[in-house]
Amino acid sequence: MKIRIKFLKQGSMKFIGHLDMMRYFQKVMRRADVKIRYSEGFSPHQIMSFAAPLGVGITSNGEYLDIEVTETESSAVMTNRLNQVMVDEIRVLSYKKLEDSSKNAMSIVAAADYTLTFRERYKPEDLDGFFEKLRGFYDQNQILIVKKTKKGQKDMDLKPLIYDLARKGDAVFMKVSTGSTDNIKPELVMESFYEGQGWEYPGFTFQIQREEVYGRDGAEGRLIPLEQYGEDIE
């Protein structure tokens, strides 16, 4: 049986990297007595995969983990059981059953929402003016940048990969392409904006929080939160 788990990652846990998060959840599965499946072979390991690794220093309200189990209790019972053995800064939000034919979350990730909150010393004095310029940046027909890759550099247009960029109170909200093909980090978007204004972009300008991760519906191409691919177990 395939299971998709949604969880949040807050507070000091934002400094825990992806590999340590994998080890953490492996221990959680044992402590919570989750009947997780193991791979076959000389070195069996838990069948587990994360949707999109989160960068160090970024908090999240919408992380996803796929596992396979041999048996399970209800979603409510399993959510409670997992949360009882975890630190307060990581909490399971949902535990959903997937269809047997479902692809794992990592392979279907298409987009993600982020909220960027100004750190106090970097907050502009003229917020209205800042967001007016940000809207002008997003309204351009093209946003051409030079992106660094493992093989060097390449020219690319960010515009088609930014699905939304707007003001959210005193913070910046964005929905951007995410996944193995076109993975756009929010820092890259803001760095491009600042450079276009002739401003310096300090690396610690924003506290970044991921809000949700999406897959894309095959028929209509619309974005769907990964949580909605599964159903509660009664």
Image: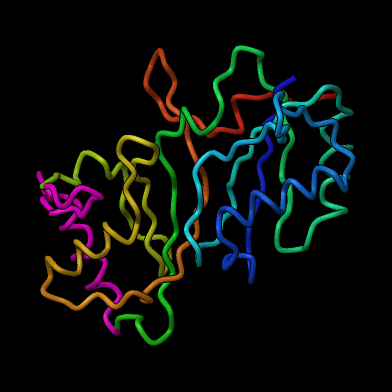
Residue 129 magenta-highlighted: yes
- Residue drawn where x is 88% and y is 44% of the image: 32
**Residue 16 point in image, percent of width and height:** 60, 63
Bounds of the magenta segment: 125-154
- Residue drawn where x is 56% and y is 26% of the image: 104
Which of the 4 image quadrants contains residue 188?
bottom left
Looking at the rendered image, the quarter that the C terminus falls into is top right
Specify the farthest residue to the bottom.
Answer: 121
Residue 67 magenta-highlighted: no
Looking at the rendered image, the quarter that the N terminus falls into is top right
Residue 80, compared with residue 220, is above or below; it is: below
**Residue 57 point in image, percent of width and height:** 50, 67
In the shown orientation, is residue 16 left or right of residue 116? right
Residue 94, compared with residue 170, is above or below; it is: above
In the shown orientation, is residue 63 left or right of residue 169? right
Count of marks overlaid on the render: 0
**Residue 11 point in image, percent of width and height:** 64, 69
